[in-house]
Image (tube, rainbow, N blue to C red):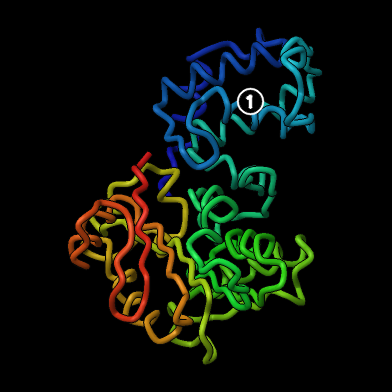
Amino acid sequence: MKMRPAGKVAAKWEGSWATARLVTLGDWLKFAEKMYAREQVALGQVATNAHDEALYLLLHTLELSLASSAAVLARRLTVAERRRVEVILRRRILERVPAAYLTREAWLGEHRFYVDERVIIPRSYFLEIIPEQLAMWLPAGKKVRRVIDVCTGSGCLAILLAREFPDAVVEASDLSAAALEVAAINRRAHGLVRRMKLILSDGLAAVPPGRYDVILSNPPYEPSAHVDRQAPEFSAEPRMAHDGGRDGLVIVRALLRQAGARLQPHGILVLEVGDSARRLIESLGCSTRSGYRRGMGLTVWCYFRPRG
């Protein structure tokens, strides 16, 4: 990620507002929102609006509960606290470091995961799909015995699968050894060392033989040209977690080719493919923009996720 020269960053900050006048947490929140807008900070990794992300950063930095009431905004900050808050806001707003990399955590619903620059920051519609819909797509009464999360990154989706299917063997694969190191941290934190196996693999290529009830993946699906133009916050994430090749579907197609021989007869392949959904569905011959296609020996569910 390209950084701005330190001198220019400091001058821009000092010229925008005299931070010495900021006394309460509410003052700092208003200041942060103003600076987010002025600097056109990219959002979508932690929150979709400046107020929520800035408030999260402030509460985390001050070691206050994320469930604090609005009364916390009247809290007066000590000199030391103001210094800490200013440092974190400078890094986020001017240096454009993603909030989750500053706090070393990301949340999917009520579940906390460790993250750092080795992995993409978790954000997925699978948070709702796994507990609310996944079991409905499988035959009634069919016991789920084996599931895998491909392109697992931080391991967050594999952990959600383990919670949804407590009797299943859970596997998680990724091409990045560094990402699997982070997944191992989260596996341990969620008490799944014995149940969840981590595998270094390009898709399913190096995954040990066997068939799955569920193959789930949130693979890289952005076209390379789009990745080249991403905002600094998204460029700070591993490129391999975004770049899906020229049309965004190179890795998805490879996974489709691999999955047919790795599913149980009743098994399902569930993909999140973002703006590439239309192209994928058209290439499979589907008549709907989102839905499923039975063919190639597998069931493909395609979900459209608009870009933030």
The foreground one among 280 and 165 is: 165
Residue 62 pos. (x, y %): 76, 29
Left/right of residue 11 with respect to residue 195 in the rendered view:
left
Extreme-bottom residue of the structure: 209
Left/right of residue 223 with respect to residue 139 in the rendered view:
left
Left/right of residue 199 with respect to residue 5 in the rendered view:
right
Q: Residues within 10 Å of mark 1 (few under 14, many from 20)?
A: many
Quadrant where the C terminus is found in the figure: top left
242 lies above or below 231: below
95 lies above or below 216: above
Residue carrying label 1: 55
The foreground one among 53 and 172 is: 172
Residue 241 pos. (x, y %): 43, 61
The foreground one among 82 and 44 is: 44
306 lies above or below 276: above
Quarter occupied by residue 147? bottom right
Left/right of residue 239 with respect to residue 32 in the rendered view:
left
From this viewpoint, is residue 121 visible? no
Amino acid bearing label 1: Leu
Residue 96 pos. (x, y %): 48, 38
The foreground one among 40 and 144 is: 144
Residue visible at 56% across and 61% down in the picture: 135
Residue visible at 63% across and 59% down in the picture: 160
Quarter occupied by residue 91? top right
Residue visible at 55% across and 66% down in the picture: 140
